[in-house]
C-alpha cells in the first residue's frame, strides 16, 4: 500500500519533520536558489498541496528551514560546550586546534547543517527577512565561543572575532576539505586571528603565511588567467555582468539572463563570453576594479547604497557554495579565499597595531572576521569610515 495512504498517515509533527528534512537535503545538494515546493514534494514523497497546507508557500518553507537550523545550532553548540569546556587562558595553540576541529566537523559529520546554514547566511545578506534568523544562529555560535574562552581577557570580543571568522571560513572549509595546501592556509590564518598586538608575527611568520597563499595559486589559476583586459563592447558587457552579480548573486547568472538584462542577442553575449568561466572572469574582474577604486576613495561609499565592496563581501561566500555544485566556480572561490585581505592589508595593518612588519595572517583573519560579522548579521553596514570602529568590536 502507498506510503501516502490515510491508513498509514504520519502524525502531523512527523510529517512536518519529513518535509523539512527533504527541504534541507534539497538546499544542501542544489542550493537555496533551487528550492521549490515541487522539488521538496518529490524528495519527501508527499504532494505539493500537503506542503502548502502544513507549512505554507516557499517563503514560509525557507523560514521553517531557518528555524529548524536555529534549533540544530542550539543542540550542536551545547554538545561542543560539553565536549570542550573552557580553554586555558592564553593557550592559543589549543584554541587554534579547537577552531580547526569545529570547522572540520562542519565539513564532515555536520556537513548538511553547515551547508544549509551557509546558504541561509548568503540569502540573509540579500533578503532582510531572513536576517534575524541568521543573526540568531551567529549569536548562538558566539555564545559557545564565549564559554570556551571564558577565562581569557576580553572574552566577548575574542568570541565575536572567532565566531565571525567562522561564518566566512565555513563554506571554504567544506569546499576545500581535501586540500593539504588549504589546510596550511587555514591553520596560519587561525593562528594569526588569535594573535594580539603584543604578540605580532615576525617577518618570517608573515613570509610563511604568504608562502601558503602562493601554494594555492595552481588551483586558482583558471580564475586569473584571463588574458588582456576587455575593451569596447566586451568591457561594457562585463560591467553589466558586474551589475547583475551585485544585484542577484552568482548562481542565477547565465548567458540568457545577461542578454535579457542588456537587451542584446544571446549570440552576441556568447561571442564575447563563450563559457560560464568567461562570464565569471569578466564580472568578477569588473567588480574588483570597482572595489579598488572604493578602497582608494572610501567616501565613494554611502550608507544604504550597494557598492562593489559590499558585493565582494558576499561574493566569496557565494562562490564557495556555488563551487560545491558547479566546477567552473572552484578556481574563483579558491582565489577569493587566498586573497581575502590583499586589497586592504596595507590600510588595516596600522589600524591593528602592526609596526614595520605587517602581520599578513592577522590582517587576513581580521578581514575574514569583518566579512563574517556582516554576513552573519552582527553588523548591518560596512563603510570605510566605520572600519576602525568595527575592528574595535573584534
Image (cartoon, rainbow, N blue to C red):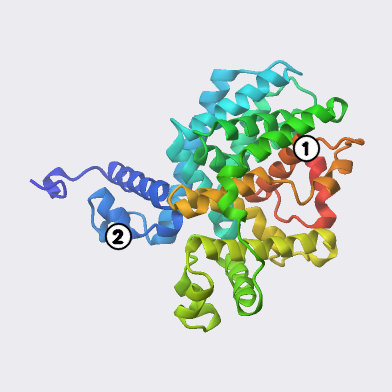
Please say if 187 is above or below 351.
above
Would residue 212 appear left or right of 46 to someone viewing this image? right
How many marks do you count on the picture? Answer: 2
Residue located beneath label 1 in the image: 360
Task: Please tell me in which quadrant of the rendered image residue 239 appears.
Answer: bottom right
Task: Using the rendered image of the protein, determine whether residue 277 is visible from the camera's viewpoint.
Answer: yes
Residue 224 point in image, percent of width and height: 62, 55
Please say if 52 is above or below 154.
below
Numbered tag placed on residue 16 in the rendering: none
Residue 358 point in image, percent of width and height: 84, 37
Task: Please tell me in which quadrant of the rendered image residue 370 appears.
Answer: top right
Residue 93 point in image, percent of width and height: 69, 19
- Which residue corresponds to the image point at 71% horizontal and 15% vertical from the top-left? 88
Residue 36 point in image, percent of width and height: 36, 60
10 Å crowding of disc 2: few (<14), some (14-19), many (20+): some
Query: Which SS class for mark 1?
Result: helix
Label 1 or label 2, whichever lies nearer to me, is: 1
Residue located beneath label 2 in the image: 38
- Which residue corresponds to the image point at 23% horizontal and 57% vertical from the top-left? 47
- Which residue corresponds to the image point at 31% horizontal and 57% vertical from the top-left? 39
Of labels 1 and 2, earlier in sequence is 2
Quarter of the picture containing the N terminus is top left
- Which residue corresponds to the image point at 54% horizontal and 65% vertical from the top-left? 279
Q: CA distance from mark 1 to mark 2?
A: 48 Å
Query: Which SS class for mark 2?
Result: helix
Amino acid at each position: 500500500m502507498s506510503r501516502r495512504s490515510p491508513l498509514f498517515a504520519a502524525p502531523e509533527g512527523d510529517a512536518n519533520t519529513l518535509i523539512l528534512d527533504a527541504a534541507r537535503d534539497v538546499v544542501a545538494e542544489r542550493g537555496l536558489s533551487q528550492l521549490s515546493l515541487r522539488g521538496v514534494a518529490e524528495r519527501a514523497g508527499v504532494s505539493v498541496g500537503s506542503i502548502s497546507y502544513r507549512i505554507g508557500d516557499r517563503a514560509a518553507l525557507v523560514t521553517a528551514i531557518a528555524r529548524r537550523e536555529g534549533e540544530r545550532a542550539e543542540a550542536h553548540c551545547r554538545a561542543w560546550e560539553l565536549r570542550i569546556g573552557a580553554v586555558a587562558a592564553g593557550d592559543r595553540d589549543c584554541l587554534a586546534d579547537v577552531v580547526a576541529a569545529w570547522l572540520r566537523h562542519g565539513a564532515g559529520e555536520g556537513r548538511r547543517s553547515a551547508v544549509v546554514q551557509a546558504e541561509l547566511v548568503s540569502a540573509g545578506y540579500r533578503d532582510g527577512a531572513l536576517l534575524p534568523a541568521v543573526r540568531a544562529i551567529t549569536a548562538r555560535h558566539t555564545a559557545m565561543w564565549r564559554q570556551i574562552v571564558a577565562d581569557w581577557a576580553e572574552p566577548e570580543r575574542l568570541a565575536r572575532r572567532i565566531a565571525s571568522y567562522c561564518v566566512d571560513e565555513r563554506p571554504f572549509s567544506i569546499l576545500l576539505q581535501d586540500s593539504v595546501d588549504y589546510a596550511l592556509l587555514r591553520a596560519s590564518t587561525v593562528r594569526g586571528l588569535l594573535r594580539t598586538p603584543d604578540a605580532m608575527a615576525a617577518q618570517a611568520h608573515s613570509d610563511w603565511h604568504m608562502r601558503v597563499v602562493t601554494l594555492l595559486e595552481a588551483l586558482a589559476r583558471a580564475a586569473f588567467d584571463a588574458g588582456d583586459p576587455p575593451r569596447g563592447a566586451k568591457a561594457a558587457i562585463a560591467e553589466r555582468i558586474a551589475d547583475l552579480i551585485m544585484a542577484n548573486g552568482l548562481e542565477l547568472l547565465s548567458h540568457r539572463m545577461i542578454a535579457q538584462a542588456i537587451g542584446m542577442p544571446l549570440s552576441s553575449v556568447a561571442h564575447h563570453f563563450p563559457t560560464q568561466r568567461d562570464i565569471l572572469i569578466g564580472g568578477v574582474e569588473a567588480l574588483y576594479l570597482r572595489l579598488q577604486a572604493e578602497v582608494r576613495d572610501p567616501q565613494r561609499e554611502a550608507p544604504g547604497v550597494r557598492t562593489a565592496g559590499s558585493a565582494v563581501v558576499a561574493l566569496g561566500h557565494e562562490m564557495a557554495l556555488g563551487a560545491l555544485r558547479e566546477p567552473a566556480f572552484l578556481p574563483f572561490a579558491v582565489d577569493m579565499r587566498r586573497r581575502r585581505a590583499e586589497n586592504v592589508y596595507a590600510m588595516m595593518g596600522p589600524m591593528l597595531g602592526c609596526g614595520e612588519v605587517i602581520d599578513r595572517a592577522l590582517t587576513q583573519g581580521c578581514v575574514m572576521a569583518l566579512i563574517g560579522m556582516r554576513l552573519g548579521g552582527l553588523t548591518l553596514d560596512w563603510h570605510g569610515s566605520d572600519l576602525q570602529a568595527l575592528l574595535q568590536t573584534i
